[in-house]
Image (spheres, helix red, strand yellow):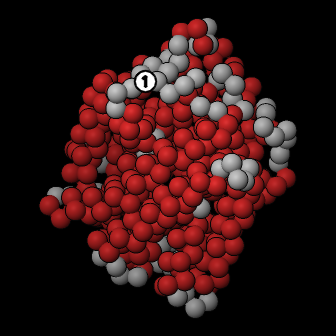
Amino acid sequence: MPMPNVKHRWLLLVLLGTLSAFGPLSMDLYLPGLPELQQQLHTTPALAQLTITASLIGLAVGQLLMGPLSDYLGRKKPLYAGLVIFMVTSFLAAITDNIWWLIILRVLQGVGGSAGQVLSRSIARDLFNGHQLTRFLAILMAINGIFPIISPVIGSGILVFTSWRGIFILLAVIGLILIGLTMTTLPETLPVDRRTNHISRAFIEMGQLVGNRAFMTYVLAQGFVYGALFSYISGSTFVYQDYYGLSAGVFSLFYAFNGLGIVTVTKLTGNLTGRFSEQKLLKISVLLGTVAAIVLLINAMTINAFAIMVAGLLVVVSLVGMVNTTATSLGMQLSGEHAGGASALLGLGMNAIGGLMSPLVGAFGTNSVTPMASLILASEVLAVIVLFTFKGEQS
């Protein structure tokens, strides 16, 4: 299907990139305020980090609903519903005084935000296939990658004038803006004649993808790499600020630099597509990430040099851009007409495994780099095992 003749094509690309960035928007924006949130709500680091996990759980579960629904109803109706849920729960999160209510609201906020994540990938698959899909996803994910760069900086700026509550107000405003842009910019990319004819059939078709070994290879490999990413996301604010004594503003600069690495590698992936197969690029990126994780852990357990830690994290985080682009493209190309269900399962792998890894950093301790580095390495090793052993017919 050719790209729709939309007057503002780049506005459409920016919109889809933003919709795909609900993970960074929901987490990175308020990461600098996590220590303050912990203090104001009189809770523990583990429970404060559980608000990250809660959002990831919502993102994962929500995608399992939104994906099949979009194969049945089209892309826009589920997207509208998700954006409204995201906007309302963001506002309620800003006014709660209880950590458990905040955790519940974060789950619901994740469910709402999941619509943007799953449908941005589904819409891309509606429009493109093969190397064209990989290049288009590279553009979307490069736009997506901007948010980890700017979100902590914006969050730190907001904290100068208000508390972490103001960050959730901003998220509610972003949700409202995206509703307006979706109404005016986004076309319906799944015609009625291409939709699944019954909602139960849409869920059955998604379930059938679970039995596709090649598809699940990409889901799990990408998911474990996201486990490494979210181990970093969950632990970095405490490592940089509490262990190394950096201010929230300086931490945000380091965090933004890693986000720039994701954008750069994502752009590189788009340029390399066609010269190298997506499978080869995926394997190379996972292996390099594992090597960097080994260096990161050895450093944490020996000399604990700040520069080596920063360099190791840069490599691990940047390579997520290549893994994300190639694994998503390969998985979506195996989806046939069931792009919504395929996108949901890919999102489930990323958010569920990331959600499981995030609280472990706090549970194992935040007074050294070793817990974060250990979990990053464990995740990368699992990705290698899956990618090189658990594989079926390739696309």
| Dot 1 amino acid type | Asn
Which is nearer the eye, 225 or 37?
225
Q: How many marks?
A: 1
Q: Along the horizontal axis of the image, is 389 left or right of 202? A: right
Which is nearer the eye, 289 or 167?
289
Q: Where is the N terminus found, in terms of image quarters?
A: top right
Q: Position of residue 296 (x, y in %)?
A: 60, 77
Please tell me how crowded label 1 is: few (under 14), some (14-19), or many (20+) other residues with Cα within 10 Å: few
Looking at the picture, does residue 34 appear above or below residue 89? below
Q: Where is the C terminus found, in terms of image quarters?
A: top right
Q: Quadrant of residue 298?
A: bottom right
Residue visible at 45% across and 19% down in the picture: 188
Q: Position of residue 266 (x, y in %)?
A: 54, 55
Which is nearer the eye, 170 or 364?
170
Residue visible at 69% across and 73% down in the picture: 291
Q: Along the horizontal axis of the image, is 183 left or right of 194? A: left
Residue visible at 69% across and 25% down in the picture: 336
Q: Along the horizontal axis of the image, is 262 left or right of 385? A: left
Q: Position of residue 175 (x, y in %)?
A: 30, 36
Residue closest to the far left: 161
Looking at the picture, does residue 390 appear above or below residue 311? above
Q: Secondary structure at mark 1?
A: loop
Provide the residue designation for mark 1. 5
Q: Is residue 372 something one can see in this rendering?
A: yes
Q: Along the horizontal axis of the image, is 168 left or right of 22? A: left
Q: Position of residue 123 (x, y in %)?
A: 52, 29
Q: Is residue 226 something one can see in this rendering?
A: no
Residue visible at 22% across and 62% down in the picture: 157
